[in-house]
Amino acid sequence: MGLLNNYKPEKLFTFEAADSYPYELTEWHVINWDQRRRILVTVAFEREIDEDLDEEFGTLCQALGKVVGDLDDDVNLLKFSKNFDLISASSDPTMDIFNVPLYCPVNMIPKKYQTGRVISRKDLVEVDRLKTGVDLVTYRFEPKSTAVFKYGVDPQQAPRNWRELNCWLRVSEHPNVVPFEYIITDFQDVPRHGTDMEVVVGFTSTFIPGGTFEDNRSRDFKLKYLEQLIEVVDDLNLKFGIVHADITRRNIVINPTTDTLQLFDFNVSLRANSESGKPDPPRFTRDKIDVNSVVATVYEIITGDSERAAAIIEHGEPTSTVTRMKWVKRPDVCLDAGISSYQRTLRCWLRRRNRPLNRVRHFKQAQSPLEEWPQPWAPKIPAMRSDGSLITSWDDAGTRSSVDVGAMRALGLKFVTWERPAHNRIPEGFRVLADGTLVAQADLDGDAQGHAVGSRSGHRDQLALKGVKRRKGRAPGGDV
């Protein structure tokens, strides 16, 4: 299920940037997601940066995959020949040329959403490394639990994670949304803005077993699941003024306890706003993104025709045409009604959504629009060199969402670190916490017994004392 199952190097590494130096080398800023470690990789030849980066990075990933298992944990610089043979590996702190994100202070989240929901990274124990920026975890205070931990490691991911968190926690009480569980925090220092600040580094959601409709393509797709998908999309769009913008098979699961369809992954979701400044695709308007995606997703689940499904989403192929054409069911998909019933349900819904009263082009037109959530934090900080000296003065400081890691070290400031042991170097009898530290299983077992009978008296009891209800399979606290 995880990142390292059916091992493929191209899934283990991603690159943040690439630079080419005339007659010298090409430099790649790479993240190794097994260790969540950034590595500076140089290849000894110049290349045109505007060429196909993905193809060449694929070759580099294969080369990295062959050597990464033999490297020391602190290696941060690799040099390859033009034939992608490893020349050298080093652990030079001065070559940590990356920026670290400035995470948003937890007090930016309204108190009503914080109550009973804020826990530390040290409260999470790693179970599996699912994919980039996503782990399966258990809570130290609830050892038999399973949850999904989503986080942002680099300056590009962190703001997206913040936006997703703020959207998801506000719609989490919907029965057809995978429950949001906890806000995960750590501590950082920010020059002239505070020391030991509690900041948000990610969040957890309920783990739903059974996989998505992309993972498990032979699972049942009942007519009621389509009706539930329609209901949650209507509520997001028309009631809350939210555009999910990524409704696909990979973001839909079935809760086996309730036999209910649930939607997740709000990392590109936004409040409906036609004034985005971006042109709409042909035959395609922002308020219909989710509508078209529902038709495309249902069509693909039933027929397996990914090409036409993509045409509906990306090129705006008319949904009315798709719902009236002949659908050929995949042999391995199980339906509890005829295909015509699914098509008829979609056509009725499309007619209803096309009525003027059901066209929400701006979130303020929604029935109960969600309040505006805070934008990612970007404090005023001057540009700094890796030795901590200023490039610009404090008077001329601009807003920044990240700071040079060398400057933070030189100034003796605390920042959020993500490095963790490689999966094949975890000592027997030890587990990895979400902050990357190792802890003995025996200590975790002792923690669990203490939480069961000690001051916490069980986490659910503590939440009850705070007036926070937690239903089975639902998230604690907060109202939408």
Image (tube, rainbow, N blue to C red):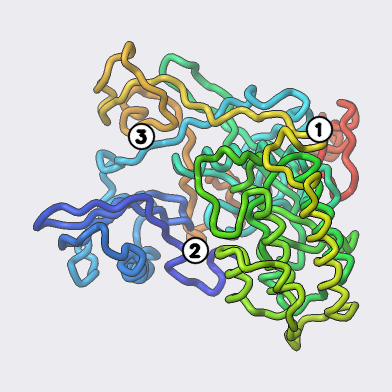
Task: Give the left or right position of residue 456, taking residue 13 as reference.
Answer: right
Give the residue drawn at x 26%, y 43%: 95
Residue 125 is tagged as none
Determine the residue positioned at 72% across, 66% down. Answer: 295
- Residue 209 sits in quarter: bottom right
Could you tell me which secondary element the residue under label 2 belongs to?
Answer: helix
Nearer to us in this view, 91 or 230: 230
Residue at x-position 68% and y-position 42%: 361
Reading the image, the residue beneath label 2 is: 424
Residue 91 in view of the camera:
yes
165 vs 88: above or below: above
Which part of the image, by quadrant, shows the C terminus?
top right
Q: Residues within 10 Å of mark 2 (few under 14, many from 20)?
A: few
Please state the horizontal and vertical placement of residue 441, each as a whole percent of the image. 66, 51
Q: Are marks 3 and 2 in contact (CB under 8 Å)?
A: no
Label 1 crowding class (10 Å Cα cut-off): few <14, some 14-19, many 20+? some
Label for residue 405? 3
Q: Is residue 446 something one can see in this rendering?
A: no
Of callouts 3 and 2, which one flags the residue occurring earlier in the amino acid sequence?
A: 3
Quarter of the figure that contains the N terminus: bottom right
Type of residue at label 1?
Answer: Gly
Point out residue 359 in the picture as x, y percentages from the top left corner.
74, 46
Marks 3 and 2 sit apart, C-alpha to C-alpha, by 27 Å
As drawn, is 296 to the left or to the right of 240? left
Q: Which label lies toward us, 3 or 2?
A: 3
Pick the residue in front: 124 or 289: 289
